[in-house]
Amino acid sequence: MTLKPQRHVLVVFPHPDDEAFSSAGVIRLYRNMGVPVTYACLTLGEMGRNLGNPPFATRESLPEIRRKELQEACKVMGIEDLRMMGFRDKTIEFEDDEKMVKLVQDLISELNPSLIITFLPNYSVHPDHEATGRAVVEAVRRMPKDERPTVYGVGFANNTIAEKGEPDVIIDITTVKEDKLKALLAHNSQTTWMVEENQKRIDEGQPMSDSWFHYEKFYTISFVD
């Protein structure tokens, strides 16, 4: 599937590296097309389980490390408009729902995006992921039908395909796979070991592909009025 032209793309995720795993290739492709991309990252992921491999961060130093990693990943993806929204990691699920919806409404009002990329509610595992996706979907649902942007949801829970079917948006990112790899590696404190483990399995001929770097998949979220 080829990318549809867009006026402006808004990406909304709760943690640094969510974007790299899910949509760095699509973001880079849009930037190569000259499409503006704004990334609203809700937290600094300061409660992340990993402190580097081998460890080089502490609980005290991790927030600033992840801030710099996020900025570097955005450079790789070509994102010039990064919004760090200042919420505390692992607390998005406890924020007032209306507050989160208002945050998204304000971004939409300012940017007038034609496409929003976020998590697919009920199929994104982490409570912060779920709360983020819900806020985006509700903000768009409240808009007049003819003004709503398209919303792509990232779903990866084990039951996603069984209940939702295959994603309807599958984008070939092969031409920018090196950029995606660089974006992932920019989040060094969290991702290096995962990338290395994946490559080791591929090199050993194990039944695991490098499909991360060939396709990115999304569900187009529909709205029932």
Image: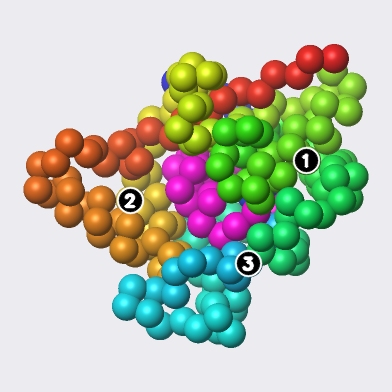
Q: Residues within 10 Å of mark 3 (few under 14, many from 20)?
A: many
Q: Is any part of residue 83 visible from this angle? A: no
Amino acid type, callout 3: Leu
Label 1 sits on residue: 135
Is residue 166 visible in the rendered image? The answer is yes
Q: Secondary structure at mark 1?
A: helix
Vertical placement of residue 154 versus 58, above or below: above
Q: Is residue 202 above or below residue 86?
A: above
Label 3: state its secondary structure. loop
Amino acid type, residue under disc 1 in the picture: Ala
User: Which corner quadrant of the image does residue 74 belong to?
Assistant: bottom right
Local crowd at mark 2 within 10 Å, few (<14), some, or many (≥20)?
some
Tell me the kind of residue under disc 2: Glu
Residue at the spot of label 2: 178
> Label 3 belongs to which residue?
44
Query: What range is drawn magenta here?
Result: 14-40
User: Between disc 2 and disc 3, whose residue precedes?
Assistant: 3
Sequence order check, earlier mark of 3 and 1: 3
Relative to the observer, which residue lies in front, 58 or 106? 58
| Picture layout, residue 162 above or below residue 130 | above
